[in-house]
Image: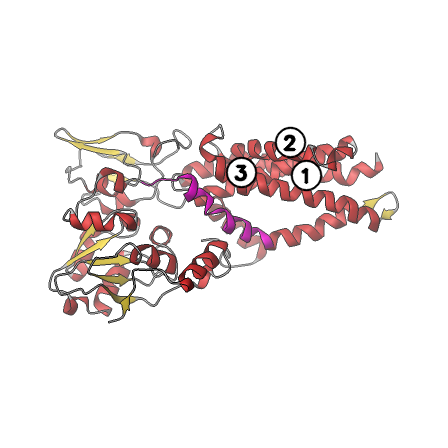
Amino acid sequence: MPQVATAASFRDFCGTVGARIGIIRRKYKVAPGIYAVGTPGSESPVLVTANYKLSFDALRLQLCGVDAWLLVLDTRGINVWCAAGKGTLSTEEVIRSVEHSRLALVVSHRELVLPQLAATGVTAQDVKRGCGFQVFFGPIRAADIPTYLQQGNQCNETMREVTFTLPERAVLIPVELFLLAKPLLITLALMFVLSGIGPSLFSLNAALHRGLTLLTATLLGIFGGAVLTPLLLPWLPCRQFWIKGVLAGLAAAVISWLLPAARYSLPEQLALFLWMITLSSYLAMNFTGSTPFTSPSGVEYEMRRGIPVQIAATCLTIVLWVGSPFF
Amino acid sequence: MHGYRYIEGTATLQVDLQRCVACGLCAEVCPHRIFALSAEGLEVKDYDLCMECGACARNCPVQAITVSPGVGCAAALLAPLVNRLLGRKVLSGCC
């Protein structure tokens, strides 16, 4: 049985940074199966988790002084809650893992402790029926596991409620930005082409100068939607994220007015202004996927309102920006 | 969850209290603590706090809870359209 440490190594630290930035996120996995923490015996508890290395680390690093078995499911390298929502952390996967790992030969009891958030994908009664193991839904956060075990598999109310604190939001920003790199490069090429169009058909000089300004506006829009929105989320007025993004975009737009963008013509200023706000609005709407409180029905509701506005504003931006050299 | 509320009146959560056997499993698994169990039975404290994760409905032994579950993510909801436009099968990049 592989033994795992309860302290982080330098390599774990680098891996966490790489996964949080996004570079190695999709392949940051551990092998599914049973692992030992401390010196577990046949009576020791079985803690179940996903095989995303960040989830695995989040659990094992909290288990200093605990003797337990870890049953790592094959969730294709996806975290507990997302995998439960997408169906890879399921009743069937729990049963399959219990049988495949021959857990019944390792422990004498018939109990599994699953993270509470796994309940989205796992039906406790069906696991019992399928493999004889009774499922206990433990706390949401791994940090509460030692207390949970000490209290005899009992959770306090706070252990069962999700939170979305400033550090929890801030840590998501690098991935948001990383995922934008590819679309940004494609947009960048388009922006330089659009910026060069003028009375003389195409001006390379204008493409570079105006293109650079448009790039600055784009970066500020990204700052509004993917940095300011997550940071200021509870304080931005309005429930709908696309409107929160407009407000965050406005804040970013004000910054740009302190930059040389103000020396452009009025239609161009308007185009830049609109673009920053629209981009910020769109990215803020996308941030719904990273929060722990937005319902799909609500997201659909706001997309039906936000997307038409965003499309209209983008069209107007293009007309103003491309048209301004002709005005 | 203090400090956060999403759009009112959109969540699809429905609870059939006639059917409920007050086992308390929904109250246990709900990450937004919207169920309360007392001597009188189950009570839904606030429907608007529901994020439609589906944990309660999945674990209800008598199917008293219905909710249209899913991930509240704009990118995921746009994925079928984007994939059709780009001729892809799966959304790449996201979670």
Query: Which callout, 1 or 3, points at the residue further toward the start of the chain?
Result: 3
Tell me the SS state at disc 2.
helix
**Chain letter of disc 3?**
A
Instruction: Point out residue A34 in the picture as x, y percentages from the top left corner.
Output: 25, 66
Q: Residue furthest bottom?
A: A1
Q: Which residue is mark 3?
A: A228
Disc 1, SS: helix
Q: Residues within 10 Å of mark 1 (few under 14, many from 20)?
A: some
Q: Residue at x 25, y 65 (%)?
A: A97
Classify residue A206 as left or right of residue A236: right
Are the two marked residues, 3 and 2, in contact with CB atoms closer than 8 angstroms?
no
Task: Give A266 or A316, whichever is nearer the viewer.
Answer: A266
Is residue A113 one of those drawn in magenta?
no
Residue B73 in sight from this viewpoint: no
Q: Position of residue A125 (x, y in %)?
A: 18, 52
- Secondary structure type for disc 3: helix
Q: Quadrant of residue A254?
A: top right
Task: Say what amino acid the circle numbered 2 marks.
Answer: Val
Left or right: residue A34 compared with residue B50: left
**Residue position for label 1:** A315
Q: Chain of mark 1?
A: A
Of the numbered discs 3 and 2, the one sitting upstream in the chain is 3
Q: Amino acid at mark 3?
A: Leu
Range shown magenta: A162-181
Q: Quadrant of the C terminus of chain A?
A: top right
**What type of secondary structure mainly makes up the magenta span?**
helix
Please, what is the three-letter code of the amino acid marked with disc 1?
Cys
Residue that badge 2 annotates: A254
Circles 1, 3 touching at the beta carbon (< 8 Å): no
